[in-house]
Image (tube, rainbow, N blue to C red):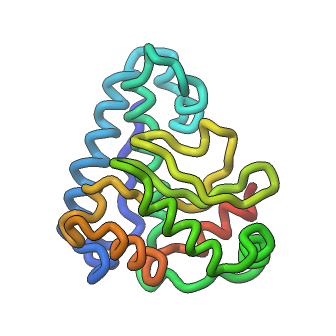
Amino acid sequence: MAYQLPALPYSYTALEPFISKSTLEFHHDKHHATYVTKFNEAVQGTDLDSKSLEEVIKAIAGDSSKTGIFNNAAQAWNHTFYWNSLKPGGGGTPSGALADKIAADFGSFDQFLEAFKTASTTQFGSGWAWLVLDGNTLKVTKTSNADNPLTSNQVPLLTLDVWEHAYYLDYQNKRPDYIDAFLKNLLNWDFAAQNFAAA
């Protein structure tokens, strides 16, 4: 049961000028596609072949004999989640229950923004910044390389890819500018709210 590369939920030019067509083509069609291909090759003919990415990630997290499978499964999952965390005309502030929960757990929306900027900026090397529901509490976390909150029994609500290939063509070494563009112009609060409501 080969896992299929999901199409982007918008056109290659939809996120311009904040994320370019070139970046999306390179990031989705090359990086994401490679993780999907390598995952399918690694699990073909095994008992993992019939499982979802989420099931595979949770089943083999921490198993050093399956690090390669984990990395490709998690990166395939992380990227799909990231594409959905972005939308044209995004950013701004959330509303409804999620907005109330952010204010309650972080103290204010501005304090959430600071926490997310700090996590995104200080993730050394490759990785991800996340807004998660941990038990009944919203938290900002960061993970290295392919790791994600599913391995910690947290519910991811949104993520930002801070691997260099996510932003280098557009921002070079200016990761903070990429983070600001995400928060102000691209963040898909509707997707985060759906994940929160389903938790």
How many marks overall? 0
Tell me which corner region of the image, top left, top right, bottom left or bottom right, holds residue 145. top left
Judging depth in this view, the residue of 77 and 155 nearest the camera is: 155
Tell me which corner region of the image, top left, top right, bottom left or bottom right, holds residue 192. bottom right
Q: Is residue 44 above or below residue 143?
A: above
Q: Is residue 148 above or below residue 87?
A: above
Q: Position of residue 168 (x, y in %)?
A: 22, 63
The residue located at (65%, 38%) in the rendering is 152
The residue located at (75%, 55%) in the rendering is 199
Q: Position of residue 86 (x, y in %)?
A: 45, 70
Q: In this rendering, would 23 be left or right of 92?
A: left
Q: Position of residue 12 (x, y in %)?
A: 27, 71
The residue located at (41%, 80%) in the rendering is 88
Judging depth in this view, the residue of 47 and 82 nearest the camera is: 82
The residue located at (38%, 43%) in the rendering is 4
Image quadrant in which the N terminus is located: top left
Q: Is residue 56 above or below residue 105?
A: above
Q: Is residue 120 above or below residue 93?
A: above
Q: Position of residue 90 (x, y in %)?
A: 48, 81
